[in-house]
Amino acid sequence: MRAVVFEGAGALALHELADPTPGPKDVVIEVAAVGICGTDTHVFDGEFEGTVFPLIPGHEASGTVVAVGSEVTTLAVGDHVAVNPSTTCGECEFCLNGKSNLCRHWNGLGVVASDGASAQFLKAPVANVFRLKPETDLFQAALIEPTACAIRAYDLLPRRMGEHYLIYGSGTMGLLMAQLAPRAGAASVTIVDLNDRRLDVAREVGIEYVHQSADDSERSEWDVVIDCTGVVAAIEDGLPRVKAGGTFQHFGVAPTDAKASYSPFRIYRDEINVVGTMAVLNSFGRAVEMFESGAINAGPMISHSFSLDDYASALEMFRKGTGRKLQIRPNDTESRVLQGSGA
Ligand SMILES: [Zn+2]
Ligand SMILES: [Zn+2]
C-alpha cells in the first residue's frame, strides 16, 4: 500500500509498504478520509509528547472494512466505519479509575506509537472501530472523531437548559461545539472569530449569532464561554464575559508554556467554574449517534481533499489557515476543492 510516513521530526516521505494484516482482534480498513488537525502539525514538528518515529500520521479516519481478525464477530467485510484512535494501557491509576483519556501511557493511532490512517489501509483494534449506517456519508464521517472530543467536552460542562453560549473560534472544533450547543440545552449560541472567512462557515452551518468580536454582540455576559482557539488573547477576552455562576471551558490547545491572566477575585466572588477537557472518553459511540442523527451540518465544514501525493501541501495549507477542514483521501488519485475558493 501507499502511505505517508513521518520519518522523524520535520521529515516526510511517501512509501510503498506491505498491506497490513489483522491480528485476531483487529480489523483492516480501506481508508476513505482522514482529517488534518493541529495535532498532526505537532506530531510532524516533533512537539507531541511521546511520538515514536517513523510513524504513519492521521487519527480522524473513516473507511470500509476489508479484512477482520479470526476473533472478530461484531464487524464484517464491507461495513462502513469510523475509528476511535485512542488506545490506553488499562493498568495505570487513571485507566483503573474510569479516566482512561488521562492514561499515562496513552497511545493514539497516528499520533504516538501506532500507525495512523494516512495510508491506503489502516489496521485498528476492533474495540476502536464503530460501524456506520450504509447511508452515512463516508467522507464526512471523518468528522466523527473530533465530534467525540466535543461530546467529551459537553460531558464535563456543568450546564442547565436555557443558557446562553459564547464560543471563541470558528474552526472545526468551534463549529462542532456551536452546533451541539442547542442539543445540550443552549437558548442562544454566539460564535466569534477574528477571521471573517471562517465566520462564513459558521453562517453556512446555521449558527445564530456570528461576530468578529464579542463586543459586537447585543449581549455582554454569557452563562457558558468556551475557548476553541487556545489563543491567550481569546482566553483573556472570554473569561471576563462569563456571567456570575457560569462556566469557562478550555477546549482549545494552548502552547504548553503559555500563561493567561485572570482575576482570582472574580472567580471567587462570582463562583466561576473553569473546566478543561481532553480528547475522547466513552464518547465515540455517542458521537456516531449524534452525527447520524443530523446534529452536525458537515458539508460546509470540509473545504479540500488531498491525495497522498499532496500530503505536504495539505499540511502547508493547514498551517496557513486558509481552508476549512482539510482531508486526506488516500485512495483518491486527485486532490479536490470541495468548498469555497480556498484563497
Ligand atoms: Zn485531530
Ligand atoms: Zn493507563
Image (cartoon, rainbow, N blue to C red):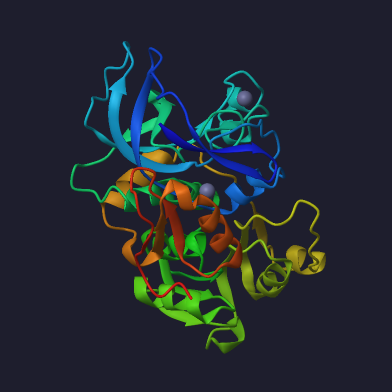
Residue drawn at 64 percent across, 45 percent down:
44
Does residue 277 appear anywhere in the picture?
A: no
Q: In front here: 296 or 165?
A: 296
Residue furthest to the left in view is 135
Q: In front here: 329 or 38?
A: 329
Q: Quadrant of residue 335?
A: bottom left
Residue drawn at 81 percent across, 53 percent down:
257
Q: Quadrant of residue 168?
A: bottom right
Residue 217 location in percent, x, y? 54, 86
Is residue 203 placed above or below 315 in the rendered structure?
below
Left or right placement of residue 283 versus residue 64 in this view:
right
Residue 194 location in percent, x, y? 59, 79
Residue 287 location in percent, x, y? 38, 46
Residue 192 location in percent, x, y? 55, 76
The quarter of the rendered structure image containing the N terminus is: top left
Residue drawn at 32 percent across, 58 percent down:
295
Residue drawn at 30 percent across, 45 percent down:
289
Is residue 16 placed above or below 186 in the rendered structure?
above
Does residue 39 appear anywhere in the picture?
A: yes
Q: In front here: 189 or 339?
A: 339
Q: In front here: 200 or 158?
A: 200
Left or right placement of residue 290 versus residue 212 in this view:
left
Left or right placement of residue 277 versus residue 20 in this view:
right
Question: How many numbered marks are there?
Answer: 0
Q: Quadrant of residue 70?
A: top left
